[in-house]
Amino acid sequence: MAILIKNGILITLGERAQVLENGALLIEGEKIKEFGPTNKVRKPAGAEEIDASGKVIMPGLICAHHHLYSAFARGMKPPREPAKDFKEILEKIWWRLDGELTAEDIYYSSLVSLIECVKKGTTTVFDHHESQAYQLGSLDEIQRATEEVGVRTCLCLGASDRYGRGHQGVEENKRFLKKLGKERGLVSGMVGLHASFTVGDETLDRSVEVAQKYDCGIHLHIAEDRIDEDDSLRKYGLRVVERLAKHSALGEKSIAVHCVNIDEREQDILMETGTNVVNNPESNMNNAVGCADVLGMIGKRILVGLGTDGMSADMLSQMRVAYMIYRHSAGDPRVGFSEAGEMLFKNNPEITKRITGWKVGRIEQGWLADIILIDYSPPTPLHPQNLLGHLAFGMVNSSVDTTICNGKILMRNKRLVGMDEERITQKSKELSRKLWERLSC
Ligand SMILES: [Zn+2]
């Protein structure tokens, strides 16, 4: 099917970002066929037409680290004794929650989170799933939700020995990657590990073996809190990144999430191995674990992307928070802004291409047609040089009107297409209430 979008302010992003005042875009099948001034892009016979007057036409956004299952934690009663540190946050909240998830919980929490992605214009998601009691088959549930909603996901299960079932987690990653094979459609896969401090050498080595067999990388949390480094030094006499390098877990297809407490030597190893880093500033602030040396890592030419760690699906707001915390931590109002923009609009697409092969995040002929329309009439001049200012202070507060992924319209005029949102919301309420009852909260 062909779709012509016209009369909007078209922002291409990419290395030579263009802003077309009255732009049009033609989608044919799954790809971008052409773009240009509205009067130059011809409408093929039978093509659907979308009038983007008063809107910006731009590429769909990418979240490089999410936990879709976290949807069911919203509004959950906090522990009686508040968690006093990161370890207690995991023990009292997240590990209790993921220990009770059923197949249906996984499916519906994924649906809810992915619908939010559509509403916020996030069309590619790297999910890191955990569900101790339901591991085997869990990734199928998220795949089913992905295909129903219609965005792209790259899935993995964070295997962990903390509950004595690390082997099962590795098995699930392996099973799922084997099932995906080479034909990946909207869903791709990685090998997930929770974090160094909950993963023994055997689970680590088996995961690396699976990743090598299926030519993919490892997606894991690194040094989110100091306990990860302390644990690695105590058990192995190595810092976390050194340990992972020793076991060949790093590389251009791997994602090192957080990296808040790594040192200079570890940064160098990430750079030498070409490992992708993904920072999640809202989550790091929420857990009071500190701010990663993102500017230092970018200075070393490490590819640092941006995720939400389950906090939201809103990547523009995450970018705004990112620049503020980097700037605040550096105590220098000259830094952080362009770097945060680079992370979202340049590095996330590059990480996606490296890991999944998907060419997304840019309006260019032949690239995948993941496109969003945002309500926005700029009150000041808008051009490629000040685009980031409009995104961080204007569009961040605007509504996404239309979301298209893989050439398919998922939301139009702010209404989801072909999805019964009310039914999904009702079912989600019912399941989360039951989950909370099982957790006695
Ligand atoms: Zn995470």
Image: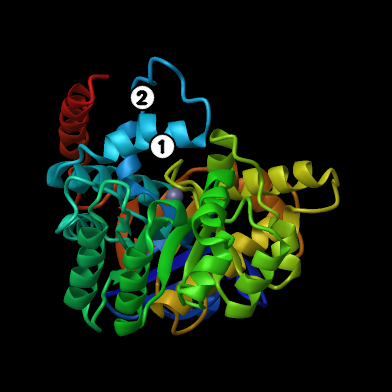
Residue under the image location 57 percent in, 68 percent down? 242
Q: Quadrant of the C terminus?
A: top left
Marks 2 and 1 close (CB-CB < 8 Å): no
Residue labelled 2 has its Cβ within 8 Å of some atom of ligand 1: no
Whichever of callouts 2 and 1 sits on the residue coming sooner in the sequence is 2
Towards the viewer: 135 or 55: 135
Badge 2 crowding class, 10 Å Cα cut-off, few under 14, some 14 to 19, many 20 or more, is few
Towards the viewer: 324 or 278: 278
Using the rendered view, name the quadrant where residue 386 is placed: bottom right
Towards the viewer: 85 or 346: 85
Q: Identify which amino acid the numbered label 2 is placed on.
A: Gly
Residue under the image location 53 percent in, 31 percent down? 85
Q: Which mark is residue 343?
A: none
Percent of width and height locating residue 112:
28, 43
Percent of width and height locating residue 346:
60, 69
Q: Which residue does the numbered mark 1 point to in the structure image? A: 90
C-alpha span from label 2 to label 1: 17 Å
Percent of width and height locating residue 132:
23, 46
Q: From what the image shows, is residue 307 above or below residue 245?
A: above
Q: From what the image shows, is residue 429 above or below residue 118?
A: above
* Residue 214 in sight: yes
Q: Quadrant of the N terminus?
A: bottom left
Indicate the secondary structure of the residue bearing disc 2. Answer: loop
Q: Which residue does the numbered mark 2 point to in the structure image? A: 75
Which of the two marks, 2 or 1, is nearer to us in this view? 1
Q: Is residue 242 left or right of residue 74?
A: right
Using the rendered view, name the quadrant where residue 99 is placed: top left
